[in-house]
Image: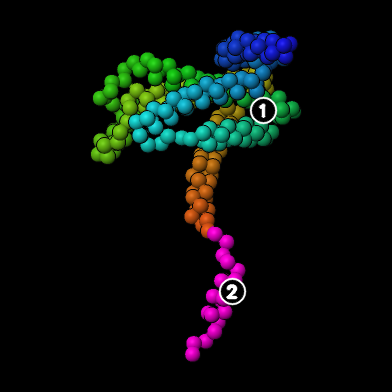
Amino acid sequence: MEDLTGLFDSLLKLMVSFPTTIFHVFASPDKVVGMEPNTLVSPPGATLVVSFIIWYLSHSMETKIKYALDLPYAPSKTFVIRVFVVVTFVLLVQYLVLLIPSVVPVPPVDPVQTVKALSYPVSVSMAIYGLVYLIYILFPIGSKPHGMTAQERLNGVFRKIRKEWGTKRIVAEENAGSFALLAGILVYIYALYNILRVLFNLSFHKTIFPTIVLLITSLLLMVLFSYIVFERLDGLVDKLKSQKEAMPNKGNSGEEHHMQDTPDG
């Protein structure tokens, strides 16, 4: 009974500390990764897990919508696992980049604490992405069923191609994805800037360079992993499936080989 009570207490504390942590990453990053963190700040691992759950809810909603209406591109649960692996690897590479003397004046000493601190911008980005997507799906303001999506309005070439191909789409769902992606990217940049500034005690101007370096590194890694993990790996799996055959019979294969070696007549 005590273990169950402790579990509920931990969950209640996490429910209260999670939104507080997200707020502090924006407004007071020193209370998250500073010398004296706030008592209501949730641990980085727990924050990442909760944010991942929020993102997964939006992903599940997107998948249900597209499967129900037989629209293209409905990612599987394997996609979600791969995303988590990619995020973890990107955090490790970001730490290695920060070890370069020209990136930050004082390289990080503790790899675990540094990676934990770098996970907060990822958590904030995933949480905001999921929340924006879910809220917009519930309240699709400005999305008319027979109108154009935000991307179609901004990109004339994209709009022309879709019109020629007659691609099926849901305006509200596509707008939700576009707005969520934009919000996620913007808050990640700002949160990463805040965390780096406090973590390495940098001035406002000196934080810009390491922020840009980590953003470029993360973008290149995600493009590389998108090709290797999501395209190359799937192609390899399909190729191996096509090579699936039963083990040949030893006797028959030997007899066939002997017949091939025997000259005619």
Prevailing secondary structure of the magenta residues: helix
- Tell me the residue at 26%/24% (across/down): 147
From the viewer's side, name the closer residue of 45 and 65: 65
Of labels 2 and 1, the one closer to you: 2
Magenta includes 52? no
| Disc marking residue 208 | none
Seen in the picture, residue 195 relative to 232 is either above or below; the reply is above
Position of residue 224 measured from the top left corner of the image (x, y, whole percent): 53, 42
Task: Report how far apart the C-alphas of labels 2 and 1 lie in the structure.
Answer: 59 Å
Where is residue 140, by image quadrant? top left
**Magenta span:** 246-265
Say which residue label 1 marks.
115
Answer yes or no: is residue 182 visible: no
Q: Position of residue 220 (x, y in %)?
A: 53, 38
Quadrant containing the N terminus is top right
Q: Nearer the viewer, residue 173 or 36?
A: 173
> Residue sitting at 33 percent across and 27 percent down?
170
Q: In this image, 88 relative to 148: left or right?
A: right
Residue at figure coordinates x 44%, y 19% from the top left: 134
Tell me which amino acid carries mark 1: Val
The answer to whether residue 203 is seen in the rendering is: yes
Tell me the number on the disc at residue 254. Answer: 2
Secondary element at image label 1? helix
Nearer to us in this view, 194 or 117: 117
Mark 2 crowd level (few <14, some 14–19, many ≥20, 10 Å Cα): few
Q: How many C-alpha atoms fall within 10 Å of the one at disc 1: few (<14), some, or many (≥20)?
A: many
Magenta-span inclusion, residue 252 = yes
Three-letter code, disc 2: Gly
Asked if residue 197 is positioned above or below residue 156 in the image, the reply reads: above
Residue furthest bottom as drawn:
265
Instruction: Tell me where residue 14 sits by quadrant.
Output: top right
